[in-house]
Amino acid sequence: MMKWPWRSATPPTLAADHIARRLDTHLILHPGYCGLRPGQARIAAGGQLQPGDWLLAPGPHTLQFPLLAAWPECGVSLQICASTPDPRLPQQRLELYLQEFARQYGPHLSLSHLQSQIAQSVQNACARGRIRLSSCPDAHEWQSARSELEKLLYLRFGWLVENCLPCALQPGEAQALALLQAADHAQAAANAAPAAPPEAPAALPPTATALAQRLFLELPALAHSWRAQTLFGAAHAQRQQLLRQASLLEALAALPPRQEAGAAPSSAHAQAWQALDACWETLAHARHDDSASQHSALQAWQTMLTQSEAALRPTEARRAGGDWR
């Protein structure tokens, strides 16, 4: 009897605390999950998944973390779910985030890891004044902060906020989250593999090839988001210049640079990778009626383009000179 490749005995479920994983086998999607195939429509229950697809628990998922470092017991409780596909985009923001995550951490995304990344991004935005909250916000201040938070979570991570409420955290919960964030940051900054496998996935330093692949995938989406911004005067002229520079960088990223076997990734690749993260974050807070936020986002975009080009150009220069090592 012929055995179809998707009739796998592997159960289409996720491990405890995991909300997404990239598949290495065929399976049939069961209710309660959805499938993501990059560049294509979402796959519903009953559909067939193949290696390379993502098995996703779309939520809602509940996250709790402190908003401000000065008041670790004053937190926020979020209910998030996977964003619905936007037919205007060639690749969805959630797909781009999952591909970025897999290149750094591997094929399994846990809810605690996602919460750590979101908390770090939101706390950075609060510390820089992009999300403004006092220790006792009124209803208007809270709704304004929620609007900024929703834009940040969608543009940076591809998740939608269904509910957002203030909550009180126990001191132990705030301390545990701080330890998780510190461990995640240490793993992302490490240039060597750990001696023993940690509980959380260790981040791999971004290589020139990984940076080029991410730029090639995300620059069109970033440019699309920038074209949707309403800019005038000098800001509009700067945007047009950066769009042209982004097109040139996209062409450069289309030819991923080769690295010698065993060559360690340079700090320039890590800096460009972090600058791309910051570019998405600042774009989420750029408002058409706030020239300061637009200027900050444009500066972050300029920094990202400059650092990315500096990280990719040396290898490309060797190619032009005939050195294809």
Image: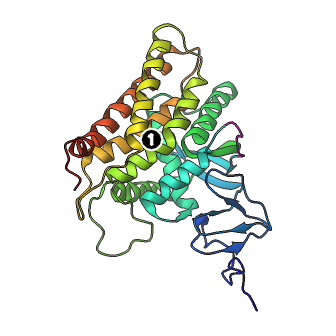
In this rendered view, identify the residue nearer to me: 148 or 309: 309
| Residue 220, x across and y down, in percent | 53, 36
Check the image and name the residue furthest to the bottom. 1
Please indicate, yes or no, whether residue 134 appears anywhere in the rendered image: no
Q: Is residue 259 visible?
A: yes
Q: Nearer the viewer, residue 280 or 195?
A: 280
- The part of the image, by quadrant, that contains residue 181 is bottom left
Compared to residue 2, the image places residue 253 above or below, namely above
Classify the position of the N terminus by image quarter. bottom right
**Which residue position is annotated with label 1?**
277
Which residue is at 60% across, 67% downward? 17
* In-image side of 68 versus 13 (left or right): left
Say what amino acid the circle numbered 1 marks. Asp
Q: Residue at x 64, y 39 (%)?
A: 89
Q: Position of residue 90 (x, y in %)?
A: 63, 42
Taking the spot 45% from the left edge, 31% from the top edge, the residue there is 247
The quadrant holding residue 18 is bottom right
x, y percent for residue 74: 56, 43
Asked whether residue 170 is drawn in magenta, I would say no
The boundaries of the magenta stretch are 84-88
Q: Is residue 109 left or right of residue 49?
A: left
| Mark 1 residue element | helix
**Does residue 290 appear left or right of residue 273 in this picture?**
right
Classified by dominant secondary structure, the portion drawn in magenta counts as: loop
Rendered position, 227 above or below 256:
above
The quadrant holding residue 288 is top right
Above or below, comparing residue 216 to residue 236 in the picture: below
- Residue, far front: 322
Q: How many marks?
A: 1
